Amino acid sequence: MYRLFYRLVLSRLPAEATHRVSFALLRMFAAIPGVRTLLARWLAPRDPVLRVHAFGCELPGPLGLAAGFDKDAKGPGALLALGFGFVEVGTVTAEAQPGNPKPRLFRLPRDRALVNRMGFNNDGATAAARRLARPRTGVIGVNIGKTKRVDEADAIRDFKTSAEELARFADYLVVNVSSPNTPGLRDLQAVDKLRPLLRAVRAACDVVSPQRRVPLLVKIAPDLADADIDAIADLALELGLDGIIATNTTISRTGLATAEPAVTALGAGGLSGAPLALRSLDVLRRLRARIGSRLVIISVGGIESAADIWQRIRAGATLVQAYTGFIYGGPLWPRRLHRELAALVRAAGIASLEQAIGLDALAPAA
Ligand SMILES: Cc1cc2nc3c(=O)[nH]c(=O)nc-3n(C[C@H](O)[C@H](O)[C@H](O)COP(=O)(O)O)c2cc1C
């Protein structure tokens, strides 16, 4: 049904406008008294085999909505009601900024992929904090990035400002150094730059939230060399981070079914969706082999089915996220995946999804 509607209607509209209108409609609908509760009753995962524990929280299911869909924390509650186990809002930057000129979001339907160069369009940390301060239920992560106009030399101060505004409202906080659409941002993944940045954000979290230790994660790019992934994994352990999110979008364009001239005509940006799946799984396996089960790994990139989630969990992910799969799958997609995943867990003869985390993982390197 959604596939037909998508093909006949949505795919003919500009991608960003479609996103804006459908998200606004969902928020309006969910704001009608009683509707959110009804939606959640129908769509939210309730099968106990799917429950996962992370960051001191119990999540009803492992599939979360990845950063970028709700950049301004306008409707995490409505998105949770669609059946996501958790929602990550952002990327939020310290200062409000418009992002790159439009058009900046493109569909590649033949590849079940998207290309975006949004450039962290958002209302800024103060506005997001105001929205997140409202009463709420469910697990909400907050993803922070660098304001575009701020030089790399001032990046730490800029990230600290966001952390100070937002950490107390975050069930977990993510330092995003991996989006390809903010010039120079990914250079911060180099360990000698990342170490002081993460230390400063950790300290800022502890100052603004002395009672509750805010879990801190870093989100990495799929385009890193394997040695750099290992170095970040080691750094995460050294600094006592709580987890790693792998991965963001890729700048690679290899292996696409869409004709090359059409892909080139779209221009720069990060590629997400099915073509990212293999590399994302690779990065997950590498991280897991390096750090074992000592940190939470959130695997993201190209997840389309319950079988994909099952594979990531067995490879060592505690949680997974998706964005592009949701765009192509529609509003009932999270519910379907969670239900099919519960069936996979039962078919494997285990009592809980949590018992499957890392079942297929390689032994950690000595
Ligand atoms: C339109 C769009 C905007 C995104 N914006 C962000 C963002 O602001 N911050 C971020 O960390 N990741 C962002 N992402 C990356 C996703 O969170 C995710 O890491 C990536 O898309 C891979 O997952 P997927 O293949 O399920 O889409 C964005 C992705 C898309 C498609």
Image (tube, rainbow, N blue to C red):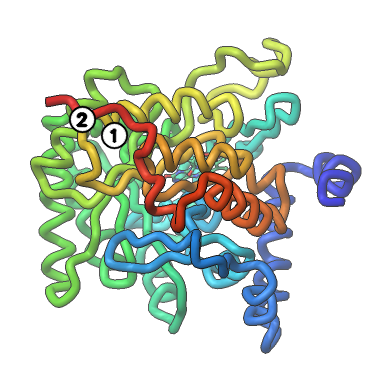
**The C terminus: image quadrant:** top left
Does residue 148 appear in the picture of this structure?
A: no
The response on whether ligand 1 sits within 8 Å of label 1 is no
**Residue 346 or 255: which is nearer the viewer?**
346
Query: Local crowd at mark 2 within 10 Å, few (<14), some, or many (≥20)?
Result: few
Question: Is residue 241 shown left or right of residue 105?
Answer: left
| Mark number displayed over residue 33 | none
Q: Residue at x 43, y 42 (%)?
A: 313
| Mark number displayed over residue 288 | 1
In the image, residue 362 sits, relative to residue 326, either above or below, namely above
Q: Residue at x 45, y 34 (%)?
A: 181
Name which residue type carries label 2: Pro
Which residue has dot 2 on it? Answer: 364
Question: Is residue 264 shown left or right of residue 309?
Answer: right
Q: Position of residue 223 (x, y in %)?
A: 38, 22
Q: CA distance from mark 1 to mark 2?
A: 7 Å
Number of callouts: 2
Question: Is residue 222 shown left or right of residue 334?
Answer: left
Q: Position of residue 344 (x, y in %)?
A: 58, 47
Q: Residue at x 20, y 56 (%)?
A: 160
Q: Is the C-beta separation of discs 1 and 2 under 8 Å? A: yes
Q: Position of residue 13 (x, y in %)?
A: 81, 44
Question: Is residue 230 shown left or right of residue 178?
Answer: left
**Residue 93 or 343: which is nearer the viewer?**
343
In the image, residue 224 sits, relative to residue 180, either above or below, namely above
Q: Position of residue 53 (x, y in %)?
A: 35, 62
Helix, strand or loop under label 1 = helix
Q: Residue at x 50, y 18 (%)?
A: 252
* Marked residue nearer the N-terminal end (1 or 2): 1
Name which residue type carries label 1: Arg
**Residue 240 or 352: which is nearer the viewer?**
352
